[in-house]
Image (cartoon, rainbow, N blue to C red):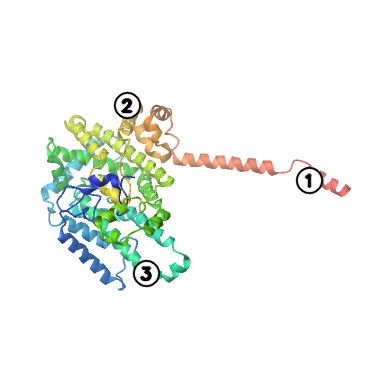
Amino acid sequence: MADLPFGFSNRDDDDRNRGDEPGGSGANNPFGFGGAGAAGFDPAQLGQMLTSLGQMLSGMGQPGSAQAGPVNYDVAKRLARQQLGSTITPLTPGATSAVTDAAHLAELWLDGATTLPAGATKAVAWTANDWIEETLPTWKRLCDPVAEQISGMWTAQLPEEAKEFAGPMVGMLGQMGGLAFGSQLGQALGQLAKEVLTSTDIGLPLGPSGTAALLPAAISEFSAGLEQPESEILVFLAAREAAHQRLFAHVPWLRQQVLGAVEDYARGIKMDFSSIEQAAQGLDPTALTDPSKLEEILSQGAFEPQTTPEQKQALERLETLLALIEGWVQVVVTDAVGDRLPGAGALAETLRRRRATGGPAEQTFATLVGLELRPRKLREAAALWRRLTTDAGLEMRDGVWAHPDLLPDSDDLDSPAGFIDSVIGGGTTQFDDPLAQLAETEARERDAALREKSDSAPEDGAGPDLGKDSGAS
């Protein structure tokens, strides 16, 4: 686990986390404090944080002021918008119209590349602020399990008498924890909002269902370093967004599977409290005032979550799902745009490398949830979908999404021949007709019940014979 949730550190990532921007740090150091010496420290940022802290503390205990849940999302939203500052360019009618036209054109092209119909009921242009507002409900679902798990681990270690005695203090600490989590979430979302290009840019359905969203300002900045015209890049990204929307809209279990894997991973976070106790016993109190010594203590691993077998399973399931989603989208979009966009191949490779190397989006997500959101077997998944398209056709390829049990697993991505043979041989037809499947299941259960009843019934003549024997005796 290269990145850890809500402020846990990892020395292997020091270079990436430290960042090169003046007064700041990388995406995984959302509080913005540097190492020893705090080079480039910005007092204004500290002032904003202290102001937010004062507002939160002053509201404690007042009716309606307590933030429900383990994360203070009011603080998160406020800090995210503060980080964006006044640099947000308002959407122009031209930008909005360009997004609508690009999405419409992309949908027309996608109709010939997949059997799944359009999944988005509307296409919209978002600013970075819009992205924060529209995706926050999904972030709540993803971040709450992490915060609940970490907060609960500390109170769970207290004896029952101590819990009862410390009840009011635990409540206050819970609000303080909510502020801390909200602060880090806000800083991270502010960074992420500057980088994302679409609502599904990191592979998760973050936005509202049925809404295809593109961020024109971020797309313009992304296009500045490429050779293709911005209009072509916009259509290409619109096609990717529309393909994601088709998949998530018409594969009803997929959204739950993806988000559920993230939740399962978060709930599996464990802490080794024995190592924390050992670290605390030999702790020099003066080290708490020395940032370099404190960083050294934290880097020893005592305060880092432990990776559990359940987490490893959830991570493998999530990575495989993300690879399958991204691989399918890549194949479908490639077929849809075809020769219509001469630079489509180069754009696809640019985006693939952006995901594979862990860009700002992946790094920020790792800070929030504690895992690297990276489809490690994207090439293998794309190759599998390509072979299915060629050997089995669009209908059978898209039919694999009919049920989660039909999807290839990680081993199938490494050796796809057997999986492809099973699909061509009819492996995807068993779930095509749910009513027929239900009738077949009921018939099997009925036959089994009849057999069980027949086996338990006494044989002919057994009852009277037993009665006679009993009477004779």
Q: Residue at x 58, y 42 (%)?
A: 446
Asked if marks 1 and 2 touch (Cβ < 8 Å), the reply is no
Left or right position of 194 against 171: left
Q: Residue at x 43, y 45 (%)?
A: 309
Q: Write down the residue under mark 3.
A: 169
Asked if marks 3 and 1 touch (Cβ < 8 Å), the reply is no
Q: Earlier in the sequence, mark 1 or mark 2?
A: 2
Location of residue 113 with respect to 41 vertically, above or below = above
Left or right position of 210 against 223: right
Location of residue 418 with respect to 56 vertically, above or below = above
Q: Position of residue 220 (x, y in %)?
A: 13, 44
Q: Amino acid at mark 1?
A: Gly
Residue in the foreground of this view, choosing between 437 and 358: 358
Location of residue 25 with respect to 338 vertically, above or below = below
Gap between marks 3 and 2 measured at Cα: 64 Å
Q: Residue at x 24, y 59 (%)?
A: 77
Q: Write down the residue under mark 2.
A: 390
Tag in front: 1 or 2: 2
Q: Position of residue 293 (x, y in %)?
A: 27, 55
Residue lying farthest bottom?
A: 62
Q: Amino acid at mark 3?
A: Met
Which image quarter is the N terminus in?
top left
Q: Is residue 101 visible?
A: yes
